[in-house]
Image: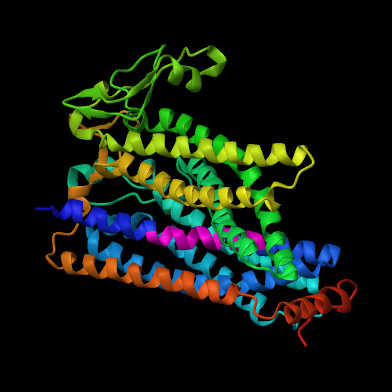
Amino acid sequence: MVSYQVWNASIFAYTISSHILIVTLTLGLSLLILISEFIALRYKNKYYEALAHKMSIALVINFAFGTASGVFMAVELFLFWPEFMRVVGDVAMGTFYAEVFAFLVESISLVTYVYFWDNFRNRWHHWLVSIGILLGTGASAALIVNVNAWMNTPTGSFNIPHYLETGKIIDVNPLKVFWEPSTFAQQFHMYAAEYLAGSMMILVYLAYKYMKTRDIEAKKVYMAGISILSVISIIDIIITGIAGSNELTTLMAVEPLKYASLEQNMVPTNYGAPEHIFGLIINGKEAYYINLPLAQSLLAYPLTLGHGAIPGLSSYPASSWSPSVSHDFLDLMVGAGVLIGLFWLYVVIQYFRKKNPMNDKKTLWATIVFGIIAVLTMEDGWWTAEVGRAPYVIRSPVPGGIIVNGVKYYGVMDISQATSYSPYVWTIGIAVIIFYLIIEPLMFYYMAKVLNIPDINSELNKADSEVNEKKVTGIKAGMR
């Protein structure tokens, strides 16, 4: 029979995997809208104006479903993880309050941007509102990641030795949660990966519509979006690679146990650590892996030609190890990221050869395939991070474990301590599954409906009048 811990963890993994699709799309849309309207106003281009308008309406649909999902997930946290949320309530609730303010910035900016589109006398002031959307969506995502970083490296936010000894929380510093040792690395990697996946998710739709439609004017609107998102993806895949490498380096310093689990290192070493591609740990030994001698040491310490400390699992009790599948998740993520990078390298080479690959049908189909891979890779990244923290929900504040009364703790709270043992979680869990099976297809359906351009000439005439007939500069801002 499935245990309470496994059931609750699986349901929440399903929930966050579903919710993050909405978040990723929100980030991608907010960036696309900002850039497309800027180009429209700067160069008086009606195609980019029409694109920005259509995408902003789609973002409203996305926002509505995302709000419902966020509320649903918050309630789920209290129902499925009561002890964890008790600690969060005492220590880390400040980040959730801040996230509410970011949500308000996003919602007010989005409503103003979409529903008062025609009322700004100065269109550049309307464009400035899109910055509020971008900042609000970005801040909301960042503040939630702050909580995750606190769970990984909870240093100084409360008296952890006293909590481990008595179960009581004292000496709370709520501001410390906003910046932990792992915060920068996680934020950097999150932003890079989310904007890449969000951009490529929208590319899937635009590439498909570009190939499907026969209307030349509609093709120009779709190509406007494809052009912007292709540039974002080319830049972002490079940044994502740098951010991922930086996060692994940070893990090695502040979470050596997690690093050893993700890399499946059985013994610590100062030189010659191999890179194991896939594989499992069976009875304390590695099995079914491809061995690349010296590769891990060289990747971790390129400036010293592989000389440097690499953590190993043998330094920790087996009960503190993450499931070995976390290593396979990491390898899948890295491998898929390399494939996506090679695809965009091909696109760049084609441009340098004076060709336009995004007009090529094969390249557009490849864009759709790699767009789907990018979304799955982003999801895989979250699974890597969360499974890699198991069996703990909140890890030790000290990289090598914290000693309290002669006992070494490798985590502040494990899954068995955090979870709910109410029999109602089984019924609620099934309701969670049904909820997302309904709302996500509906969201994508309605977004596709509003993105459809039934009367392209009317849409472009309106866009043309907005970017050419209205004064864009030199007029006092205000609402009609």
Asked whether, in this view, residue 160 is left or right of residue 138, the answer is left
Asked whether, in this view, residue 192 is left or right of residue 116, the answer is left
Instruction: Using the image as rendered, state which of residue 241 and residue 448 is in the foreground.
Output: 448
- The residue drawn where x is 25% and y is 24% is 287
Magenta span contains residue 25: yes
Examine the image and state in which quarter residue 467 appears: bottom right
Residue 180, relative to residue 318: is it above or below?
below
- The residue drawn where x is 45% and y is 18% is 295
Residue 471 seen: no
Q: Give the range drawn in magenta.
A: 18-32
- The residue drawn where x is 87% and y is 74% is 468
- Residue lying at the far left in this picture: please name it: 1
* Residue 354 pos. (x, y %): 79, 41
Instruction: Using the image as rendered, state which of residue 276 and residue 135 is in the foreground.
Output: 276
Instruction: Using the image as rendered, state which of residue 107 and residue 176 is in the foreground.
Output: 107
* Residue 316 pos. (x, y %): 24, 26
